[in-house]
Amino acid sequence: MFQRAIKLEARPRGVHLVTREILSHLPEIGRCETGLLHLFLQHTSAGLAVNENADPDVRRDTERFMDDLVPESYPKFSHVLEGRDDMPAHLKSMLFGCSLTLPVSGGAPALGIWQGIYLIEGRNHGGARRLMATLLCGEVRGTSS
């Protein structure tokens, strides 16, 4: 088992596919025949999800839906000191969640053919995001039990 802090590049508000960026920081996963990868986003104004990785319309539609569901213009927000986008970002983070646990098989996350890992950035300018990755290997490739 090992753990690594990963810094994701800054992105604007939206739904971003980050599978490759995350895996580029985890070359050790290639040695893991079976196991679990836990990802924990250390922020309260962004979230993580697994969904469609092929058609960017899915990401754009998700962003539009979330902006309609939690608009910046909602008049009853009192938490506005950090900007109009902050409270909606907190709510989006709660709706999506800040962690994922993925099975690992054959040296890679066992995602479906059309699945990828999303970063849901709730702030207009959220900055770089910190992610804690914990890899737990049940069986290491090239070894026998």
Image: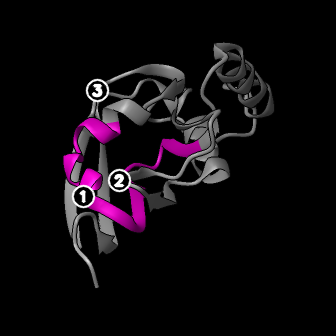
3D distance between C-alphas at marks 2 and 1? 6 Å
Asked which quadrant contains residue 60, the reply is top right
3D distance between C-alphas at marks 3 and 1? 26 Å
Say left or right for 51 vs 15: right
- From the image, tell me which residue sits under label 2: 107
- Which residue is depicted at the point 31% across and 27% down? 127
Say left or right for 98 vs 21: right
The magenta region covers 22-49
Quadrant showing the N terminus: bottom left
Mark 3 and mark 1 lie on one chain; the one further toward the N terminus is 3
Q: Is residue 34 magenta?
A: yes
Q: Are marks 2 and 1 in contact (CB under 8 Å)?
A: yes
Asked if residue 59 is positioned above or below residue 44 in the image, the reply reads: above
Asked if residue 78 is positioned above or below residue 139 in the image, the reply reads: above
Quadrant showing the C terminus: bottom left
Front-most of residues 60 and 53: 53
Front-most of residues 109 and 130: 109
Name which residue type carries label 2.
Gly
Q: Is residue 24 magenta?
A: yes
- From the image, tell me which residue sits under label 3: 9
Q: Which numbered disc covers residue 31? A: 1
Mark 2 and mark 3 lie on one chain; the one further toward the N terminus is 3
